[in-house]
Amino acid sequence: MAKALIIAELKNGKIVKNGLEAGSKAKALGFDCIAVVLGNGDGAAGIGEIGITEVIQYEYDMYNGESIAATISELVKDKGIDSIIMANSWTGKDISGRIAAALDGPALTDLVELTLDGDRLVGKKPIYAGKAFVNYAAKKSPAVITLRANTFPVVSSPSDAKVEKIKMDVSGAKATLKEFKETQGNKVSLTEASIIISGGRGVKGPEYFPKLQELADLIGGALGASRAAVDAGWIDHSHQVGQTGKTVSPTLYIAVGISGAIQHLAGMGSSKYIVAINKDKEAPIFKVATYGVVEDLFDFVPAFKSEIEKSRG
Ligand code: FAD
């Protein structure tokens, strides 16, 4: 059976869901999986939720992509791994190319589909801001794969994972990360949220974003924004969705007063259901929307919120 190394991350003592998605996909394709968990603390055994039992956890004083990629590349050789599969997270973007280069293998990144053609991995990836897709086939092994978050389901198959903790020495790296500063963003991570409510220029000013945040809190979602709203200084850039913001793929994306420019669609076009609220029925967002509401948002949003509150008693 072909072997896959799943790379998952630990955040606040828990395995980040996108690592479970990567592992579930690898298992569904029939790989024999072992996992590397990156990050400090307990909780790495959480990867056992998807039936992976062999886990190596790397802890470090400070994250360093160069050292992590070098260590993982050696591990891949030692363990005879055929494929390395992880999320297209910040870490995935940082280390996937480095690992592929070290192993002289292909890197197929930001995939929204992954299949096997014989023993070759084939991945589908959106390009040109989501206007087209390409299919890539990995011609060599080991292949490095990154998957778009929230695109692949987590398949639960609980088992007890045995975790070997290793302290990674990052002192030999040529570049050092000095500091991590978390932005004042969402309570729910935008890239992992299954529901996102985003506001655009149509909300007319910064005072409307707290109202959208209340709605997002009510339904367990995260708050997003278009670049026009960010550039106007109405909301922090950490909320921006799109080509020069975050790429998201929630189950439900609600666009409020957003026209649907191609650069915005590039960041949210792969959402499962898109609901657009816009008073202009010709707005391009309606071309990608699953449900369209042609209404003044200042009438619709409060009515929508009050209906949700009523339904919750
Ligand atoms: P507008 O296009 O002005 O749309 C506002 C919408 O609100 C309109 O459709 C209007 O009908 C509607 N509206 C107004 N009032 C109401 C009301 N009362 N009720 C209901 N609807 C109402 N954009 C991004 O979002 N993300 C990016 O990452 C990004 N990157 C870019 C990168 C480059 C290189 C470039 C050139 C552009 C980028 N843009 C990006 C900008 C993008 O082209 C658009 O300008 C931007 O997305 C428009 O934002 P918007 O939809 O909020 O505003």
Image (cartoon, helix red, strand yellow):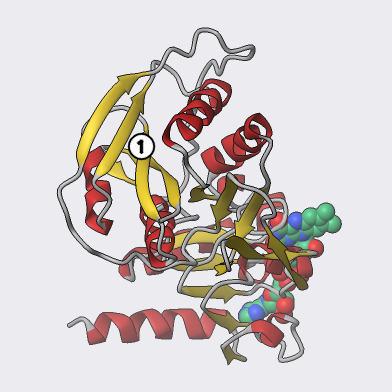
Answer yes or no: is residue 228 visible: no
Q: Give coordinates of residue 120: x percent, y percent.
A: 61, 61
Name the kind of residue labelled 1 in the image: Val
Q: Secondary structure at mark 1?
A: strand
* Nearest to the observer: residue 23 or residue 245: 23
Q: Taking 193 as reference, is 218 above or below it?
A: below
Query: In which quadrant of the rendered image does the N terminus lie?
Result: bottom left
Direction from residue 307 to residue 76 in the image, left or right? right
The quadrant of the rendered image in which ligand 1 is seen is bottom right
Is residue 172 in view from this perspective? Answer: yes
Q: Nearer the viewer, residue 99 or 111?
A: 99
Q: Label 1 crowding class (10 Å Cα cut-off): few <14, some 14-19, many 20+? A: many
The residue at the point 38 percent across, 37 percent down is 36
Figure quadrant of the C terminus: bottom left
Residue 160 to residue 98: above or below: below
Q: Is mark 1 within 8 Å of ligand 1?
A: no
How many numbered discs sit on the rendered protein? 1
Based on the displayed image, in which of its 4 quarters is residue 199 positioned? Answer: bottom right
Q: Quadrant of residue 221?
A: bottom left
Determine which quarter of the picture holds residue 296: bottom right
Residue 9, percent across and down?
Answer: 39, 40
Residue 40 spot, x, y in % from top left: 31, 27
Q: Residue at x 39, y 67 (%)?
A: 28
Query: Residue at position x 54%, y 15% from top?
Result: 178
Find disc 1 in the rendering and name its residue.
37
Horizontal relation, residue 192 to residue 51: left or right: right
Q: Nearer the viewer, residue 235 or 98?
A: 98
